[in-house]
Amino acid sequence: MAEEMKCLTQEPSEHMLVMDNDISQIPLLAGFVDRIADQTGIDMATAMGINLALEEAVTNVMLYAYPKDQKGAVHLKAILKPDSIEFVLWDAGVPFDPTKAPKADITLSVEERAIGGLGIHLVRNIMDDVSYKHEDGMNILTMIKNIK
C-alpha cells in the first residue's frame, strides 16, 4: 500500500492550501510540500528546492500584494500529474507580474547588487516553467516542476 502512495496515477490529483497574507503562515508550506513529496515519491533535494521556490513566491505575495494592514488570502494549488507538479498561486492583491522582473545579476557583489529580485531568480531556476496572468482581478502565478 505504501508503494502505491509513492507513484502518481495517470489521473491528476490536487492539493490546496489557503493562507492569510500573514508571513507567520509560511511554515505551513513545509507540510504542504511534505504531503506532495510523500504522494509523488520525489527525493528530498527536489522537495527542498520546491519548498524554497514556493516560500519565495508566497512571501512576495504576502509582503507586497496587499496594501499594509489589509487582510487578504493567498491560495496555492498543487496539481500532481504523471510527469510534473503544477503549482498555481493566486491572490486578489495589486497586479504584479514577477516574470517581467529583470533578471538578477548574481555576478555583482552584494554591495553592487540592487535590492530585491533574488526570490524570482530562485523560482525561475528551481522550477522548469513559470508563467503569470492577471484574470478576473486575480494574480495567477503558475510554476511547473518536472519530476521525470
Image (cartoon, rainbow, N blue to C red):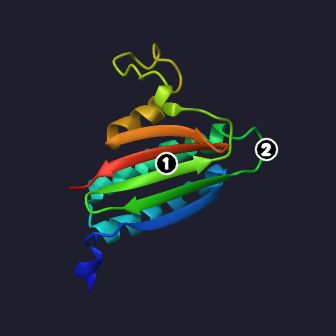
Q: Are marks 1 and 2 in contact (CB under 8 Å)?
A: no
Give above or below for 8 relative to 64: below
Q: Earlier in the sequence, mark 1 or mark 2?
A: 1
**Disc on res. 32:** none
Extreme-right residue of the structure: 69
Local crowd size for mark 1, using a 10 Å CA cut-off: few (<14), some (14–19), many (≥20): many
Classify residue 105 by image quadrant.
top left
* Image location of residue 47, percent across then percent down: 33, 56
The image shows a total of numbered marks equal to 2
**Residue shown at 45%/30% (left/top)?**
118
Residue 140 location (% of width, % of height): 55, 44
The residue pinned by badge 2 equals 69
Q: Percent from the top left, x then y, of residue 54?
A: 46, 49
What residue type is disc 2 on?
Asp
**Residue under label 1:** 55
Outermost top residue: 112
* Farthest front residue in view: 136
Name the secondary structure under disc 1: helix
> Callout 1, which amino acid?
Glu
Considering the image in quadrants, where does the N terminus appear?
bottom left
Q: Is residue 100 left or right of residue 11?
A: right
Tell me what residue is drawn at x 50 percent, y 38 percent.
Answer: 132
Q: 4 and 107: which one is in front?
A: 4
Image height check: is 47 above or below 65? below
The residue furthest bottom is 1
Measuring from the top left, give residue 39's x and y in whole percent: 33, 71
User: Image check: 139 left or right of 84?
Assistant: right
Q: Residue at x 68, y 36 (%)?
A: 94
Q: Nearer the viewer, residue 136 or 18?
A: 136
> Residues under labels 1 and 2: Cα distance?
21 Å
Quadrant for residue 24, please give it. Answer: bottom right
- Location of the C terminus by quadrant is bottom left
